[in-house]
Image (cartoon, rainbow, N blue to C red):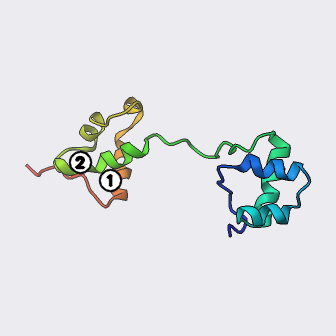
Amino acid sequence: MNHGYAMKLSNDQCAVSMLEAGVNQAVVAREFGVHRLTISRLQSKFRETNTVADRPLAGRPRVTTLRQDWTIPLMHLRNRLKTATQTTSGIPGRNRPVVSWDTVLSHLRGFGIRCRRPFV
């Protein structure tokens, strides 16, 4: 059971069409194996927006893609003496000009990696 969390069914539209046909929410919930509250929220979302697609998320949009998130530490671990700015210049993808060195630093810190420069 889902217990009220967002339902990610490939056939949300089928659930909505069952509700529009007059089937009880509890029956639809049992059919899809989710909580009745999930079906209720799906129905109210469909009434408000006339679609079952997810609403836009709140907050700041991501700067990096998932692929870039995994590439940043790998690039840095290949050459541990690279600075965050040098790592930034080698990030592949369509968002390359947008990624800052501060973003790279925060990603590296998330993996437990610190940028180290050799002491001269």
Tell me residue 2's x, y (percent): 68, 67
- For residue 100, what is the image quadrant? top left
Q: Residue furthest right?
A: 22
Q: Residue at x 83, y 52 (%)?
A: 18
Tell me residue 6's x, y (percent): 68, 57
Q: Residue at x 83, y 64 (%)?
A: 27
Q: Residue furthest left?
A: 120
Neighbor class of circle 2 (other Cα within 10 Å; few <14, some 14-19, many 20+) is: many
Left-right relation of 18 to 72: right
Q: Which residue is mark 1?
A: 108
Amino acid under disc 2: His
Element type at mark 2? helix
| Pick the front one: 117 or 103 | 103
Residue 103 visible in the picture: no
Q: Which residue is mark 2?
A: 76
Q: Residue at x 79, y 56 (%)?
A: 41
Tell me residue 108's x, y (percent): 32, 53
Neighbor class of circle 1 (other Cα within 10 Å; few <14, some 14-19, many 20+) is: many
- For residue 94, what is the image quadrant? top left
Q: Residue at x 37, y 51 (%)?
A: 107
Tell me residue 70's x, y (percent): 34, 49
Element type at mark 1? helix
